[in-house]
Image (cartoon, rainbow, N blue to C red):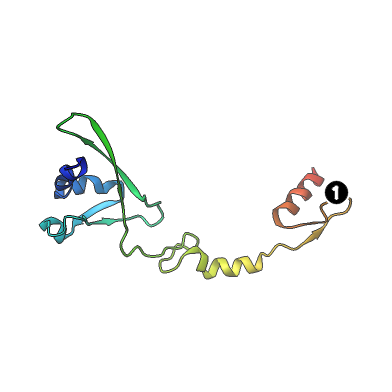
């Protein structure tokens, strides 16, 4: 029996799961199937997430091996179920930044015009921020 298998049953206890879950968000409840231990291959915890925060893909768990007495690090993968799309641009749920109407409309209006520069070496045309930088450099 390997090390993780010996400790897997301890991770399925409600107290253990609720102590690991704050690494992801605010724990609300443990799934009934997980509490009853009818599916020991997975553990599900209902967690309140802040949609603006980054969501970790894995959590580090430090385990003390009772046989050898050494501290072992285990990285547990996290899978999010039914994570809603959230737009960080307009702060609305249901779509992401790529499909946000506000940013699509704004990007079409703010298309940078091409500016011709006289006397530049190998730079005939500049766009957007490059143009602003060159104008600022000329002015000051």
The residue sitting at the front extreme is 1
- In screen coordinates, is 76 left or right of 122? left
Quadrant of the rendering where the N terminus is positioned: top left
Q: Please name whichever residue, 134 or 41, is drawn nearer the observer in this view of the structure.
A: 41
* Element assignment for label 1: loop
- Residue closer to the observer: 39 or 112: 39
Q: Residue at x 53, y 70 (%)?
A: 101
Question: Looking at this rendering, what residue extends furthest in the top direction?
Answer: 69
Residue beneath the point at 25% across and 49% down: 21
Q: Residue furthest left?
A: 36
Q: Is residue 134 left or right of residue 92?
A: right
The relative height of residue 132 versus residue 111 in the rendered view (above or below) is above
Task: Name the residue at 15% across, 32% down.
Answer: 66
As drawn, which residue projects farthest toward the right?
119
In the image, residue 68 lies at what x, y percent?
18, 29
* Closer to us: 3 or 66: 3
Q: Is residue 123 left or right of residue 98?
A: right
From the top left corner, tell me how far across and down residue 71 is, in percent.
Answer: 24, 32
Q: Residue 45, relative to residue 101: is it above or below?
A: above
Res 127 → quadrant: bottom right
Residue that appears at 13% across and 56% down:
35
């Amino acid at each position: 029996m390997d090390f993780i298998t010996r400790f897997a049953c301890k991770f399925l206890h409600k107290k253990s799961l609720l102590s690991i879950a704050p690494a992801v968000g605010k724990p609300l409840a443990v799934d009934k199937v997980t509490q009853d231990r009818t599916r020991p291959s997975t553990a599900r915890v209902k967690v309140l997430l802040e949609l603006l925060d980054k969501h970790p893909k894995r959590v580090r768990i430090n385990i003390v091996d009772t046989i050898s007495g050494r501290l072992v690090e285990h990285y547990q993968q996290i899978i999010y179920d039914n994570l809603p799309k959230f737009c960080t641009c307009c702060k609305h749920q249901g779509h992401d930044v790529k499909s946000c109407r506000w940013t699509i409309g704004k990007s079409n209006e703010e298309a940078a015009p091409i500016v011709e520069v006289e006397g530049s070496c190998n730079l005939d045309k500049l766009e957007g921020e490059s143009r602003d930088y060159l104008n600022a450099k000329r002015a000051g």
